Each structure stands twice: as structure tokens, then as C-alpha cells.
Image: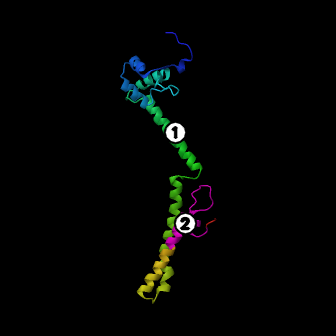
Amino acid sequence: MRVSGVIRELTCSQSQLAKALGISQPRVNQLIDEGIVIRDELATNGQVMLLESLQNYFLSKNTTGEGVSFWKERSLHEKAKRELAELKLTKSRGEVYDAATVEGVLSELLANFRNKLTGLPSKYAPQLEGKTRDKINEMLTEAIDEELRELSEGIDGCDFDENSETTAGDIAGGNRAD
């Protein structure tokens, strides 16, 4: 057989490839779907890239001792690398944060909230002395609602940037630097 032109650009029909590999035409279609057999994007009659398809086919047949396909593992590895790169990009844009950073900021915020709630009895005991049950309930409800509002504002204003000088304690304590 005499080949003229660029060998990497040789194409053949799907049925010719099926005959050469000793497989059925439907199997060639499956291999196309799996990305092993590569269609010629310029051909209108469904031809496939011969050299690239043969390389992919025989490399996909090479598996490790555990029956793992090299190409499948490579594609999984490439997918993981892409996902990691996307995660790094979203982190650099400030769209996502490390779990440890979020946990640290929220722990500090909730610790401050807890301290404020546990301080309510000593703060309000003198004011509540001699009041009616309804008035005590009203005053405590207002105090708790106020603390919850502060917590909500603190969470909304949390800055999870590790380089920021604003801390959850500043936010919860009302010292937000806007």
C-alpha cells in the first residue's frame, strides 16, 4: 500500500475500520461514543481518523493487571485536575472559601453570640424585678430578638478572606469596618 500525504490525516469509513479491527459496525459506533474512535470533523460521510482511532483502540485494550483502562484512568485524572483548577479559580475570585476558614469565623461568631445570650440574665434581672409575667416575657423576647438580629447581620457581613483584618468578633461586637 502506498500512502501519499500526511499519515495523521488519513481517514477511512466506519465499516472499513470495523473490518480491519474484526469488530461489528455497532461496536464502532460505541467506540465513537466512548471517544476512542475519532470522527473526521471535516468529512460529511462519517469517516473516522484512521491513525488516531487505531492508537486509541489498541491503547484502550491495554489495561493494567486489575483490568483498569489506561485511557479511562487518564480521563479521570484529567477531570480531577480540571475540577481542582476550577476550584482554585473560584477561590482566587473569592467565590468559595476553605472549610477551615468558614469554620473558624463562624465558631468565633457563635461563641460571641453564646456569651451575649448567657449574659442576658445578669443584664436584665434588675430591670425585670417586680414586673408582670407579660412584661418580663416581652422584654426578654425583645432582648433575644435583638441578639438574633445582630447575629444575622454578623453572618451577612462575615468576611472570610484570610487576609482581612475584620474578624467575626469585630462583626458580632458591632465593630464592622465597612
Q: Position of residue 72 (x, y in %)?
A: 43, 32
Q: Which residue corresponds to the image point at 46% horizontal and 36% vertical from the top-left?
A: 76
Quarter residue 178 falls in: bottom right
- Per the image, label 2 sits on a secondary structure element best described as helix
Report the span colored magenta. Answer: 147-175
Q: Is residue 96 above or below residue 129?
A: above
Q: Which mark is residue 81?
A: 1
Q: Position of residue 105 (x, y in %)?
A: 54, 60
* 168 falls in the magenta region: yes
- Per the image, label 1 sits on a secondary structure element best described as helix
Q: Which mark is residue 154?
A: 2
Single out the residue that lies furthest toward the bottom.
Answer: 130
Q: Is residue 158 above or below residue 133?
A: above
Number of other residues with Cα within 10 Å of mark 2, as a class: few under 14, some 14 to 19, many 20 or more: many
Q: Which residue corresponds to the image point at 48% horizontal and 73% vertical from the top-left?
A: 117
Q: Does residue 122 appear left or right of residue 92 in this picture?
A: left
Q: Which residue type carries mark 2?
A: Gly
Q: Nearer the viewer, residue 158 or 23?
A: 23
Q: Which residue type carries mark 1?
A: Lys
